[in-house]
Amino acid sequence: MSTDYTSAEMMTVTAARALENGMTCFVGIGLPSEAANLARLTHAPDVVLIYESGTLQTMPEVLPLSIGDGELCESALTTVSVPEMFRYWLQGGHVSVGFLGTAQIDRFANLNTTLIGDYAAPKVRLPGGGGAPEIATCAGEVFVTLKHSKRTFVKDVDFVTTLGFGRDGKGRDGVPNIGKGPTRVITDLCMMRPDPDTKELTVTSLHPGVTKEDVIEATGWEIRFTDALETTPEPYARELEVLRELKERTARHHAGEAPGERS
Amino acid sequence: MSTDYTSAEMMTVTAARALENGMTCFVGIGLPSEAANLARLTHAPDVVLIYESGTLQTMPEVLPLSIGDGELCESALTTVSVPEMFRYWLQGGHVSVGFLGTAQIDRFANLNTTLIGDYAAPKVRLPGGGGAPEIATCAGEVFVTLKHSKRTFVKDVDFVTTLGFGRDGKGRDGVPNIGKGPTRVITDLCMMRPDPDTKELTVTSLHPGVTKEDVIEATGWEIRFTDALETTPEPYARELEVLRELKERTARHHAGEAPGERS
Amino acid sequence: MAEFLSLHDAVARYVDDGATVCMEGFTHLIPFAAGHEVIRQGKRELTLIRMTPDLIYDQLIGAGCVKKLIFSWGGNPGVGSLHRLRDAVEKGWPHKIEILEHSHAAMACAYEAGAAGLPLAVLRGYVGSDLPKVNDQIKFIDCPFTGEPLAAVPSVRPDVSIVHAQKADRQGNVLVEGIIGVQKEAVLAAKSSIVTVEEVVDDLGVEPNACVIPGWAISAIAVAEQGAYPSYAHGYYPRNNRFYKEWDTIARDRDAFSTWLDENVYNAGGAQQ
Amino acid sequence: MAEFLSLHDAVARYVDDGATVCMEGFTHLIPFAAGHEVIRQGKRELTLIRMTPDLIYDQLIGAGCVKKLIFSWGGNPGVGSLHRLRDAVEKGWPHKIEILEHSHAAMACAYEAGAAGLPLAVLRGYVGSDLPKVNDQIKFIDCPFTGEPLAAVPSVRPDVSIVHAQKADRQGNVLVEGIIGVQKEAVLAAKSSIVTVEEVVDDLGVEPNACVIPGWAISAIAVAEQGAYPSYAHGYYPRNNRFYKEWDTIARDRDAFSTWLDENVYNAGGAQQ
């Protein structure tokens, strides 16, 4: 791997490139938000970013820490109520892509953000579904981005918080008014796409310097690779520059933001 | 009848007095609007007037010609969408009284604003239901005001656009989440209220100078009178003065409002 | 992304014969200029949806554009009847039209449900009314939690919605202000949409929660100055209440109406009324 | 008509032990001052509803006020877990709490339905999710027009809702501006409501379609300057993101949490945090 950029940067740049100019993207907080804003600041200036807090077409200068930072509202075209956001804008069919993170993902791209272990007596209680269950079904398609590890890439998720393609890959078959589901999963090692027939997640491109063995080692099932396996294009210098500036701006902003204890 | 005021003024003043200070009133256009604004400008300064156009707590200087005149919005606390008006404010239970006019009313206070004759081949096609069907069931209670005549007061309406107490007086019995229905009908001759048991409209008070025979003559069924029949109190000079000023202001406003043909 | 078109081209492209069309605006911001363009282009067999048909639909019905009307209150607000509507319903002139009528609450909910991408709207409505007897699109469902019967109506999902608004910015984002009615819902519920505006500005200059429809949710924007006249545009011009009263006389008589239509619509070229 | 009360008196009057309580504010305008007052007054056995529990519910849970939590996303936004929530769910400290969880879309619709006076909300939701298996309040109905199966959830109808807003006028009308979340819905859906505000002004000075909650739809208003801190109030003060990060450390440890609570809530009198 080149020493010019980190694997985290490679992941973000690749995720950003998945967004096309003119798409309307419902953005999850964290990695998806970083990637979506990088896209907006580089090749996709007209990408429309929507956050579930009600902020429509927002253009934050710095990355929000939460899904409802003031920055999102101040730089938005307009801000609607949360019921309107989910009813008119998401369920109403105005979102072309939902961009999600997750705690666990399985071979059929089902997402678990609910818990590890048993529901009645969880080993680890995670935050829960949030917007994801309906983003994943109402958006035209879904991109997922997360770090690659055996802990996160599991054969079967403990709990299907959010539908990928179901426990058998057929979870969207015959369902009316449903989006295409996860079409890309972008990690720090590779890009995966669902197999056109089985919907099993399959590696379509390895990031520069990453080997098949690296991916096999970090995946909780016998991961497949497409025959036409590609190498993910490296980041351009401009992308890295914009990303680093964005993160620096963000760090400065959040550090300088604590007014201290109130009197 | 005193010559100091007209029967129309008597009707409006009586209708206005039915509104108590602090009530939240969903106002129909025409006579109800005139009465509701008179109430607001006299004994009930804190009555809250809501029009179905979305104008919440409006305080028009002049009477609106339509239900959505600019005056209503400009003098309102805020203006919401029409879906919100009907969902949150009416159905949500924030309206204590709905104030309606009608084309026809029957002995059980059912209202017809749909048509005269047969639905498939109407003799007279009227405007239709508008807001009335749900105002009549979702508001805490309903006041109705209209001019008294055999044409308007019929034994059975041709079409129940809006529920009073149903064809048999039992139309609200056992219905969950429904208001009390029409508690007062105010005409240019008298005030009527539903009989506590049968719900048949019964005259409880005659306007000054009006006889029982006048009312019998103008009603399309064998109208009953309460034993304790009262005489409606006459208008105060102050009420007439405010009403006349309001109507003059309104006439001046609407006459001066035509910008003529556009070039 | 909204395309800026002339009103002629927007109507020509998006309003097909036989289409289901919403022209909305609750008393305020009624898209008269667009309605007149639909008449001039001789569109036929339209299914028109609108809570309050108002003069604009009276004119479209009298001009013979309409096959079916879905509505909840069909009068001349504060004045009386829509005589062209009545003439069509009562006497079949210029031809018989089909009507389907609702209450305001149901139509408002149906627009909301259409914008929300749902097939139905649920409301506590039509209790004791005869309207469900004459409208087979009103059904009742039982709440699975409480057992309470509630009314259900199909959502509004028109082929095209046409609304008028105060202004658009150069990216096609539109501000609707004042009595906003069901305009936003009509636009979001439709397959295509035309928004006519008083003017195009560099910056909408709005508060954070203003009613702004993003350009990417609109098909076409056409500038139509005084495009809501003789209704009104908050901040631009008042309602011509006198014309609403005069319409009663014009519309009562078929010949007077036809003459008015010739003079003010057909022979008015692209100019408004 | 809204009554102006002290925060102490408003909470004492409207928040009963065992009540169902919504404290809303989607990241923005979270009613921390009111939540702390609930803790100080030692309310118990509360059923708390909130889309995003946030630090305020973490504190209420850790303080032992809560019997049941209804929510859709229970994390420290952008930071990680709510450790007091996890400790209660995973280890039963200070006691076991019951949880009922939804998706955001369902809860947003449930608030909307509550404000609309309906017993249920209908949405295209939960397709393929395991959530309906662990939440018996999620049902499915068939659309009577299209046959499409749709999710149904009970509407939110709390005993009392508590929200924070920028300002009230002297009649008790309240302006909420910026990220408005489900605050208006929460207030309208509740039997009683408390709104804390940064300040009381003579005139709200708003545009025609601003999000204003009329005083007659609110039970009590209490002035609580910086009442949303460490979340934020658009136009007044920013979010203290640093405190949100520091909370992760404080809340991980029972003792550190208890000390924090003593110093910043119990012994902070009526002053905020």
Image (cartoon, coloured by chain):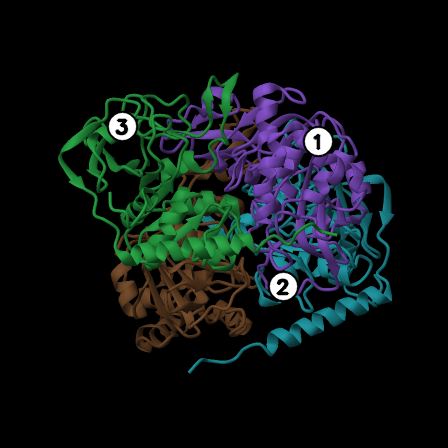
Chain colours: A green, B cyan, C brown, D purple
Q: Is residue A99 above or below residue C172?
A: above
Residue C110 shows in the view: no
x and y percent of residue B44 in the render? 80, 57
Crowding near the residue tagged with mark 3, few <14, some 14–19, many ≥20 C-alpha atoms within 10 Å: few
Q: Which residue is mark 3?
A: A173
Q: Amino acid at mark 3?
A: Asp
Q: Amino acid at mark 1?
A: Ser
Q: Earlier in the sequence, mark 2 or mark 1?
A: 2
* A258 on left or right of C90: right
Task: Report how far apart the C-alphas of labels 2 and 1 lie in the structure.
Answer: 43 Å
What label sits on residue D258 in the rendered view?
A: 1
Q: Quadrant of residue B63?
A: bottom right
Tell me the subunit letter for badge 2: D
Task: Report how far apart the C-alphas of labels 3 and 2 lie in the structure.
Answer: 49 Å
Crowding near the residue tagged with mark 2, few <14, some 14–19, many ≥20 C-alpha atoms within 10 Å: few
x and y percent of residue C149 in the render? 54, 28
The foreground one among D136 and B200 is D136
Residue visible at 73% across and 53% down in the picture: D225
In which quadrant of the rendered image does the N terminus of chain C lie? bottom left
Q: Which residue is mark 2?
A: D206
